[in-house]
Amino acid sequence: PDVVLLATGRTQRFPAREIQVEMLRNNVGLEVMTLGAAARTFNVLASEERRVVAALIWEPQRGGR
């Protein structure tokens, strides 16, 4: 892929530095964002026919719902 969207749930959490460095070494962009932002961004990039992959971390709703 040209870019990997890493959705980290409701809050933005960056992966370990080693992962970020490895992505750079392989000329793959890494964008870290919330789940909602990643879904919107994925749709835009896919509609532009970009080579995009999304890795989504799903969190259950608070309160057991």
Image (tube, rainbow, N blue to C red):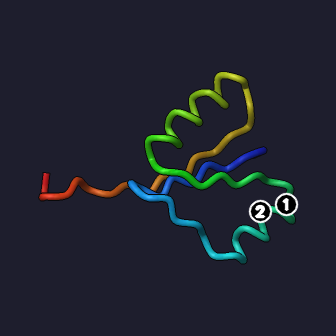
Question: 10 Å neighbourhood of mark 1: few (<14), some, or many (≥20)?
Answer: few
Asked if the residue under mark 2 is in contact with the one under mark 1, i.e. CB atoms within 8 Å, the reply is yes
Total count of labels: 2
Residue 41 position by quadrant: top right
Q: Residue at x 50, y 41 (%)?
A: 37
Q: At label 2, which amino acid type do we have?
A: Met
Work out how far the residue at label 1 is from the one at label 2, CA to CA, in angstroms. Answer: 5 Å
**Which numbered tag is attached to residue 23?**
2
12, above or below 35, in the image = below
59, above or below 20, in the image = above
**Which numbered tag is attached to residue 26?**
1
Q: At label 1, which amino acid type do we have?
A: Asn
Decide which of 25, 40 is in the foreground and name it.
40
Q: Residue at x 60, y 70 (%)?
A: 15
| Mark 2: secondary structure | helix
Q: Residue at x 72, y 67 (%)?
A: 20
